[in-house]
Amino acid sequence: MITERPVTEAAAKNSFWQNPPWAGAKPKYRLGLTPIPLEQWFTQPISPDVLRHKQNMLSNHYADVVAVSKAHGGDSAQCQLSDQLGASAEHPDLIANMALSVDDDLCIMQSTGEQRLVAGCVCSPSYWNLRSKIGKPMRLIHAPVASMNEKIGGSIERFIKGVQLLRPFERINWFVHGDTERWHPAEEPLPKTPVHTWYIRSERETLCRFSDEHLLFTINTRFQPLAAIADHPEAQQDLLATLGNLDADEVDYFGGARKCAMLTEYLHSLN
């Protein structure tokens, strides 16, 4: 299921800025799922840096990064997924062992009924905590951004209910952080460092139904220095427009009005 497709760091950086996730002034919170071939579901084996990070989190913070809802079928869902991905026997939960073979964090959701999160291994969260979400339906998971449910909650539920077996989809989510730390389970304070030293944190997210009852949601976290946007005027203008279109709930979840204002000031200064 894992196909190795080596990509140079320079090529990946250039590709990101030519088509950033906000290109065309796309809204920050949207469905934005695109079908991909099954062989591109996972693009390469786990990188050494991500493997070290995951091993550290699993060795020292296991209860924070792994959760299984036995009451909602989490054990059987893990077994079904392991038939697709395979798993070692290093840790007590299959989801943790499967996560050690890929860069991505892994979340198993019900594709029927209340669409609950039933198992996960999340070592690189951005402003959320797996332990607080396990066993909850999709709408409660997205509750911190009330307008997200209003805008796309129904579309997400319908999409999950109707998605075909073993037909993966992907989207790119993104945030702005003051560092490249992977572990951000809660909203961080406003960075005290200059804006040009901040980072775009992008997340390649995929969704694939692997059985009649369950789908896998994956999150692959990557970083780009915000300062690189200076060489890409179109990306600057599109980001300005996207930031300007955030509603109050989205601004709060993104990091607050002051953070958005500092980003806007910085982008204007580039011109």
Image (cartoon, grey):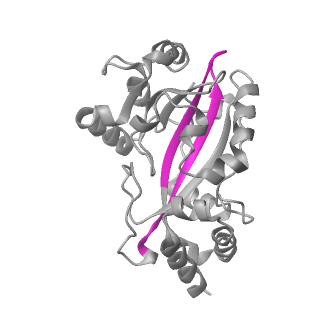
Instruction: Tell me where residue 3 sits by quadrant.
Output: top right
Residue 191 in sight? yes
If the image is split into quadrants, where does the N terminus sit?
top right
Q: Residue at x 55, y 60 (%)?
A: 13
Q: Is 198 a magenta residue?
A: yes
Q: Describe residue 96's horizontal placement relative to residue 263 as left or right.
A: left
Percent position of residue 36, x then y: 71, 36
Q: Main secondary structure of the magenta part?
A: strand
Quick check: is 64 in the magenta stretch?
A: no
How far across and down, in percent of the image, does residue 207 sit? Answer: 63, 34
Foreground pick, 19 / 152: 152
Badge count: 0
Q: Residue furthest left?
A: 60
Which residue occupies 44% across, 69% down? 198
Provide the residue span drawn in magenta: 197-222
Q: Position of residue 171 (x, y in %)?
A: 65, 45
Q: Residue placed at 36% from the left, 38% from the top?
A: 51
The foreground one among 250 and 123 is 250
Q: Residue 152 in the image: state x and y as whole percent.
A: 71, 46
Image quadrant holding the C terminus, namely bottom right
